[in-house]
Image: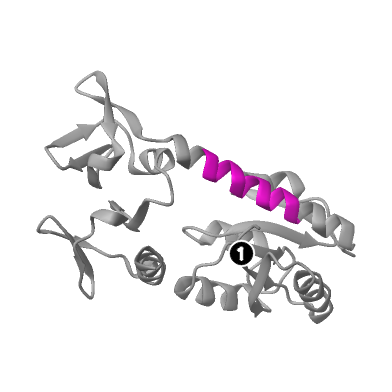
Amino acid sequence: MKETKKCIIVDDEPAAHYVLANYIKQNPQLELVFQGYNGIEAMNYLRENTVDLMFLDINMPEISGMELLKILPTHPKTILTTAYSEFALESYDYGVIDYLLKPIYFPRFLKAIDRFFATENVKKAEEAVINSVSVKVDGYFIEIELDQLLFAQSFGNYVKLHTIKRTYLASITTTEFEKCLPEKSFMRIHKSYIVALDKIDSTEKDFVVIKNERIPIGITYKRELTDRLKKLEQ
């Protein structure tokens, strides 16, 4: 049986909440954890909580759904809901996995959910086979064994890779390197740092400690880091 995924609804129309909440309740694989009626409520919630899926309306006052996706540094996988179709192509630039036109019918909703779980299965399959990452160091490509990697540190257009044995200066940006890593094992905890979660020795208020190195935690990443570490302890 597939594990339950946390989802939220962000829409300024109460009727849309009623329909989506009803559909979600009929799917035991989904758990509705929050309902927001504008982009600001969604931003505040996502700043403090981690969710798997967001049902997001495009046409909302103050901050539209597309603007919200642009503003958020990271966001859950998203299914857009709207009465208009003109934003469909642009939406896929922001990692949107599906686009539901209102009124939303249950069979179409189920198809979108199947697509969401399909992307989750692909992610798990990809993570299962990633044991190392190839990066360019001093003009040559080398393999970095991921079980040896402690943390990565942004250094302009380069990344310092701190491993158990030594440090490498790789010709790759932090964002590019992050895309190569399995999400289950690594996490960006600051705009300049990505850490191996299982290598964290201890946590302080604003830092994690790995091999006596104190690494800062960005304020927007604190809640997610806490949630991720709790899951590792379970």
Q: How many marks?
A: 1
Is residue 134 inside the magenta stretch?
A: no
Q: Is residue 137 in view from this perspective?
A: yes
x 90%, y 65%: residue: 103
Q: Position of residue 26 (x, y in %)?
A: 80, 71
The residue beneath circle 1 is 5
Query: Which one is nearer the viewer's eye here, 57 or 201?
Result: 201
- The main secondary structure of the magenta stretch is helix
Determine whether, in the image, residue 20 is placed left or right of residue 68.
right
* Amino acid at dot 1: Lys
Q: Where is residue 63 in the image (x, y as percent from the top left)?
A: 63, 69
The quarter of the image holding the N terminus is bottom right
Q: Is residue 95 visible?
A: no
Check residue 118 for magenta coloring: yes
Q: In this view, does 164 lie above or below 194?
A: above
Span highlighted in magenta in the image: 113-125
Q: In which quarter of the image is residue 62?
A: bottom right
Nearer-the-camera pick, 172 or 31 = 31
Taking 218 as reference, is 112 above or below it? above
Q: Where is residue 150 in the image (x, y as percent from the top left)?
A: 22, 48
Query: In the figure, is residue 167 to the left or right of 127?
Result: left
Q: Which residue is drawn at 83% across and 52% down?
A: 85
Residue 70 sits above or below residue 33 on the image:
above
Crowd around label 1: few <14 · some 14–19 · many ≥20 (10 Å): some
Which quarter of the rendering shows the C terminus? bottom left
Q: In this view, does 224 lie above or below 187?
A: below
Q: Which residue is drawn at 74% across and 77% down?
A: 12
